Amino acid sequence: MKGKLTKKIKIEGRIVALSGLHIGGSNTGMSIGGADATVVRNPLNNEPYIPGSSLKGKMRSLLERMEGKFGGGGNTLAGPLFISDADHEVAQVFGITPEDLKKQKKEDRPIGRLIVRDGRLAGIMDGDKFLGGREGKDKLLNNKATDMPYTEVKTEVVIDRITSGATPRQLERVPAGTVFEMKLMLNVYDDEELKPLLDTVFRGLCLVHNDFLGGKGSRGSGEVKIEVRSLQYKDKTIYDNGGKWADLDKVKEKITIPDDIDPTSKATA
């Protein structure tokens, strides 16, 4: 492999909060009486969003745990990379450091193939119906049951194990039923690797679907439903001719989306 990009795969869908979702932001500027732990928001419109780094990091972490990899590997600013073998599908999808590639004499390999976009607020679920765009956002914004714009504040209590004294704390969460966009881009450098690498991405999404996203997951927050609704590709021919995205099943044998993340599946998580 010499770094020749053959295709870009676009994976689009939704992330639906099934319980309150907390992905922490900055508390700077919070007024007295605000939440102790706030969510991340777009500073231009104050809408909460899911950082691509949060989803990508959670996917990689769970995949590494599934492989039983908890130590070794190179270090990054985020801590150790538990899988740093350039031939491993997790490293191929999510990347390793240039230093590790050099040590393995595989400098001609791409550092990573997966791009995870920030998940913008898309709307809300109104029962089984999706309300998207401004209608859904306004219904969430103007909901009288929310405590802050678009969000709720959950009060938790810390109990002192010695004195039994209670100390309250407030956690800002995006309420259950909120829907976010999901968009991932997978760079393919060899058509033979397309299906196995895409399967690795799907496996990571399934693990998040069956775990939690964001913080406080062991206390009920962060349960999400992940839906893959579109698989498309562009190759050099399409780019050269200014063409549109094409359905992926037209280029290779039909790709199977796992039941957990296939919105058309009748299987339950």
Image: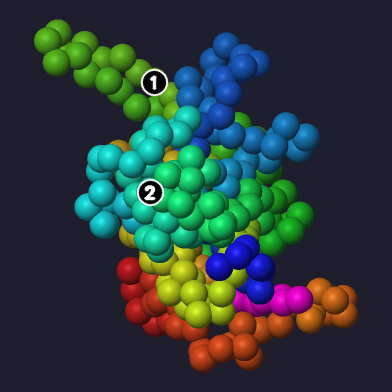
- Residue linked to disc 1: 169
Q: Residues within 10 Å of mark 1 (few under 14, many from 20)?
A: some
Is residue 255 shown left or right of residue 12? Answer: left
Q: Extreme right residue here?
A: 241
Foreground disc of the pair 1, 2: 2
Q: Extreme left residue here?
A: 162
Majority secondary structure in the magenta region: strand
Is residue 201 shown left or right of residue 190? Answer: left
> Which label number is shown at residue 18?
none
Q: Read off the magenta span.
A: 230-236
Q: Give residue 191's position: percent from left, percent from top.
A: 56, 79
Is residue 118 visible in the rendered image? The answer is yes
Alpha-carbon distance for marks 1 and 2?
39 Å
Q: Secondary structure at mark 1?
A: strand
Residue drawn at the location 42% of the way across and 44% of the way down: 103
- Residue linked to disc 2: 84
Is residue 73 shown left or right of residue 17? Answer: left
